Image (cartoon, rainbow, N blue to C red):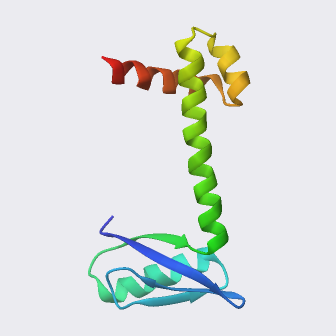
């Protein structure tokens, strides 16, 4: 695969519209999948190699969801590490945090590496 391109799109009426970053290519489509195909086709005419296209939809609501997701992740890491430091079992930490035990083990392993 060739270069990677980001396409930042916004909803305009019933379509997604946007621009491929780092190029003069504008794209649109009814769906995000359509936008991705449109961008890949347009870039094929501009660059000499296949392009990996990443479509990034933006809106105030999407930004709010992304910020909430990030805050949730920070809170999960804090509760897992706090309970882990208290020697609570992995199963209990997972239940309390609402995450799979594999995620708890991953976070606790990262905490041990950071301490070393």
User: In the image, what residue occupies the spot 72% across and 24% down?
Assistant: 96
Q: Is residue 114 left or right of residue 81?
A: left
- Give the quarter of the image for residue 95: top right
Instruction: Tell how many labels.
Output: 0
Image quadrant holding the C terminus, namely: top left
* Picture layout, residue 25 above or below residue 110: below
Q: Nearer the viewer, residue 110 or 15?
A: 110
Quadrant including the N terminus: bottom left
Name the residue located 37 percent from the left edge and 83 percent from the top edge.
43
Q: Is residue 73 above or below residue 27?
A: above
Residue positioned most to the left: 48
Q: Position of residue 10 (x, y in %)?
A: 58, 82
Residue positioned 67% across, 69% down in the render:
61
Residue 25, given in percent of the width and then of the height, sits at 40, 90
With 13 as the anchor, is 55 left or right in this view?
A: left
Residue 109: image x %, image y %? 44, 21
Q: Is residue 40 left or right of residue 50?
A: right
Task: Choose top left, top right, bottom left or bottom right for residue 67.
Answer: bottom right
Against 75, is 103 above or below?
Answer: above
């Amino acid at each position: 695969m060739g270069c990677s391109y980001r396409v930042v799109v916004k909803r305009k009426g019933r379509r997604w519209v946007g621009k491929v970053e780092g190029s003069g290519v504008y794209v649109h489509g009814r769906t995000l999948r359509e936008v991705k195909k449109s961008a890949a086709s347009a870039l094929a005419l501009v660059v000499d190699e296949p392009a990996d296209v990443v479509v990034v939809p933006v809106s105030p609501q999407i930004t709010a969801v992304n910020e909430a997701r990030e805050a949730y992740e920070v809170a999960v890491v804090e509760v897992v590490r706090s309970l882990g430091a208290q020697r609570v079992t992995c199963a209990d930490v997972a239940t309390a945090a609402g995450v799979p035990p594999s995620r708890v083990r991953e976070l606790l392993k990262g905490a041990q590496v950071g301490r070393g």
